[in-house]
Amino acid sequence: MAKLITLLCLLLCSPMLIAQSSQTNDELVSASVDAEALYDSGFELLSDLPTKNQIPLFDNRFRIDENVDEITLLLFRKRGSASVVLVKPDGSKIHFSTAEEQNVRWHDASTFDLIQIKNPAPGPWQAVGRLLPQSRILVLTDIKLTVDPLPANMLVGETIKVTARLTNGNEPINAKDFRDVLALEVIFISTNNADYDNFGRGVVQVAHFRDDGKGYDERARDGIFTGEFQLRFVSGEWIPKYIVNTPLYSREVEQAPVVLKAAPIIADITSSLAVDETHPNVEALPHEVVFRITDESVKAESLLLQGRVRYPNGEVDEFALNEPGLAPRELQLRNLGHGSYILDVSAYGEMQDGRQFMLNLPEISFVVNRPVQEAPVLEELPQSIKDEIAAEQAEAEPEPEFPWALVIVANMVILFGGGFAIWFIIADKQLAYLMFWRKKDSTAAQSIAGAQQNSSKAEKKPADVQKNNDMDDILDLTLPDD
């Protein structure tokens, strides 16, 4: 580990040290073997570097400006994969085998490439290989971005002040070197540590400052950024990162991981019954809010609270709790009936290490329900009124019962009548079929007439027979046989 630190310091601290360095390639290989053992720890290798100025690496591409004196590429790649190939702005390539011919110091390990290039050609570069996200491009140049370190014990909701400087040779960069106003972007990257609440949260855009002399910035276009941002995201372990992008330069600074703690103050609420509108003379008890400190790193006697409360009827009151002492801070709220009570609270205090802080607590609210009123009990009627009502009910004629039998008979008649009509139509019967009494008279008359006709036929039959016999005698012309 000591050899690695010595190597990287020689590579990055200053051109003078690099010029005086007489380390051989064999020593470089020996030091980088120790670095390979640190690969599994990820950013542990980067934490020992003497500078944190970087060039953004996006999609294996990066751009070098003309003021860069030296770059050091620490390119992590998948274990066992081939070493990367660098493509210069003019399209020519640098391989591990040809690095010495182009005055490039290159160590090829099984998991990373450590490359040092002096006076690199300005313009777009590309690294061809199976790179991992831990890869970094560190620059040694007179143009540097420096950012004041953040406190180690930051709190959720706290307002943090940040100061960043973009310098050229330790002097503020003249604004005439830029085509546009400088801007500083602040992001926080989750370390994806499963022991914290921000596991898997990714990247949070925290703030965006401009060097325009407005807000908290002191002077416009002086290369110094001053601003404040509020930590309104989940607690956990985060990596602060600062980025400055201009048409000419791009610089990034990544600080060591910090732990963001949850707000150290909680509110205990005791709500009273809502005021009874039906009894305005009865005094309603106030609601009570007690603020307690849950983190011992905060000095209880230094805590000051102020804010405002919004009542259900729309009224807004401001309050301040600045009494000294170690006791919890108590707040009495007026009881203005049922509805929502909302508190916006700001806290001011001091940590045990002497650091002052100011934070906004999460919104505090509670709901008071409408009081439940019992139904009024009716007074008992006098006995005389009860007797009159009973007499009226006795004299009243009973209501006739519903004629259920008549309804049933009528329904049966309708049912059978309808069924017969349907059968009559389906059987194709004539209307005369229904007159059964007339059918009997006609049958008797027809039988009498038939009897008379038969008797007359019987009287005429002998004469006809005699006549036929006479005719047979006259017409018999048959000759006897000889």
Image: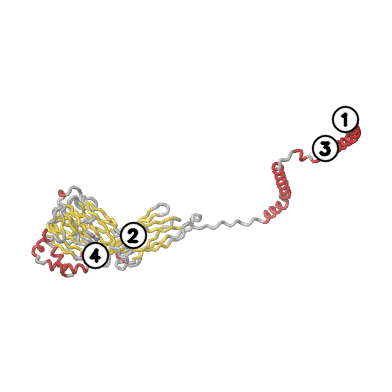
- Asked if the residues shown at circle 1 and circle 2 are in contact, with their CB atoms under 8 angstroms apart, the answer is no
Q: Quadrant of the N terminus?
A: bottom left
Q: Nearer the viewer, mark 1 or mark 4?
A: 1
Compare residues 92 and 337 and report the one nearer the observer: 92
- Give 202 or 466, whichever is nearer the viewer: 466
The circle on residue 79 is 4
Q: Nearer the viewer, residue 472 or 177?
A: 472
The residue at which mark 3 appears reads as 442
Ranked by sequence position, the earlier of labels 1 and 4 is 4
Query: What amino acid type is highlighted by mark number 1?
Result: Leu
Viewer-nearest of discs 4 and 3: 3
Residue 438 in the image: above or below residue 124: above
- Cα distance in 3D space between marks 4 and 3: 123 Å
The kind of secondary structure element at disc 2 is: loop
Residue corresponding to mark 2? 361
CA gap between label 2 and label 3 equals 115 Å
Q: Earlier in the sequence, mark 4 or mark 3?
A: 4
Please state which of the two labelled residues, at mark 4 or mark 2, is closer to the viewer: 4
What is the crowding at mark 2: few (fewer than 14 residues within 10 Å), some, or many (at least 20)? many
- Check disc 2 and give the amino acid type: Leu
Numbered label attached to residue 411? none
The first of marks 2 and 3 along the sequence is 2
**Residue 178 on image: x %, y %:** 17, 49
| Mark closer to the chain start, 1 or 3 | 3
Query: Between marks 1 and 4, how big is the CA–CA gap?
Result: 151 Å
User: Does dot 1 land on a helix, a strand or a loop?
Assistant: loop
Report x, y in % for residue 183.
22, 52
